[in-house]
Amino acid sequence: MSSPVLTVMTAAVRKAARTLQRDYGELANLQVSQKGPGDYVTAADKRCDKILREELAKVRPGYAFLTEETGVVPGTDPDHRFIIDPIDGTMNFMHSVPFFAITVALERKDELVAAITYNPITDEMYTAEKGGGAFLNNKRLRVAQRRDIHETLVSYEVPHRGGKDLPLSRAEISVLQARVVGIRGTGSAALSLAYVAAGRFDAMVCRNLHKWDIAAGILLVREAGGFVSDPDSERNPMETGNILATNADLMPQFKDALSKAREK
Ligand code: IPD
């Protein structure tokens, strides 16, 4: 049973997803145009953001927002804040690659308490509530139980062109390649975290993210029995923007591997 607020969040996400599904269908025609789909995607992103904010504000007036499209929207309630990315995986969306998500988290007194990550194309709805577990379309999730880094499949997000930490990223990929079974770059940090919660990926590593990319995913992983950490310290990834998500046995092994990359 979901709490009332998670029910409200789910309804808002489903409504926003309907416009995104339509926009995604239209995108195929724009791919081949010379101008490309850039402006169209920006408009789709903004539309989705607006629907989410309007729907959530209707039922939870006073809650603040932090969204990728609008930034900080202060509320009258000092304890609650929705954190939203209307399209995480924008580049995939733009290229008609069906690996992107609407991702929404709720913070209460700075603590993540509810989360949704929804892929509107595959209709996979990942939800979590603090202390209530994580679910995929109502089926309980559990992180993968592999204990040896040498048996793992890892999501590693490569920085965008001109992005920060390119040399570090190359060193990390090289160190990980020598230890893990496979590395995947998905283009959606939010969905990669959901895949860790679902036990599909054994671990996920990504740097230089925003709060809206990872807030929901952090709760999903924790509620599926996993752990998240800054890769280089014990700090909170919500503060540093760098994240390593995996199970308890693998956490020290990945930290060790990544520390070797920093020494390179
Ligand atoms: C991006 C995705 C991607 C990550 C980028 C983010 P966006 O979010 O999460 O996986 O590597 O750093 O910016 O821009 O598609 O919302």
Image (tube, rainbow, N blue to C red):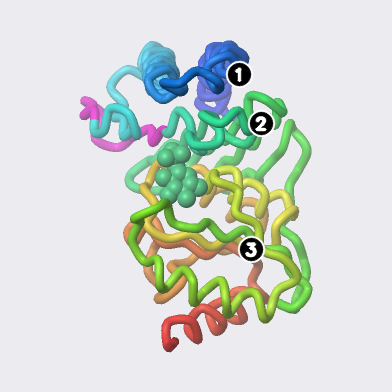
- Which amino acid does the dot numbered 2 rest on? Met
Answer with mark 2 or mark 1, whichever residue precedes in sequence.
1
158 vs 206, nearest the viewer = 158
Answer with mark 3 or mark 2, whichever residue precedes in sequence.
2
Residues shaded magenta? 73-84
Q: Around disc 1, counting alpha carbons within 10 Å, would you say few (fewer than 14), some (14 to 19), or many (20 or more)?
A: some
Q: Around disc 3, counting alpha carbons within 10 Å, would you say few (fewer than 14), some (14 to 19), or many (20 or more)?
A: many
The residue carrying mark 2 is 125
Q: Tell me if I can see residue 215 in this picture.
A: no
Q: Residue at x 61, y 75 (%)?
A: 176
Q: Using the image, tell me which numbered label, if any, was put on residue 28.
A: 1
In this image, 25 relative to 239: left or right?
A: right
Q: Position of residue 213 (x, y in %)?
A: 44, 44
- Which amino acid does the dot numbered 3 rest on? Ala
In this image, 17 relative to 202: left or right?
A: left
Residue 76: in magenta span: yes
Quadrant where the image shows the C terminus = bottom left
198 vs 77, nearest the viewer = 198
Between tags 2 and 1, which lies in front? 1
Q: Position of residue 163 (x, y in %)?
A: 35, 56
Q: Position of residue 154 (x, y in %)?
A: 66, 63
Is 109 drawn above or below residue 254 in the view shown? above
Please state the total of marks drawn on the protein image.
3
Disc 1, SS: helix
In this image, 138 relative to 225: left or right?
A: right
The residue carrying mark 3 is 203
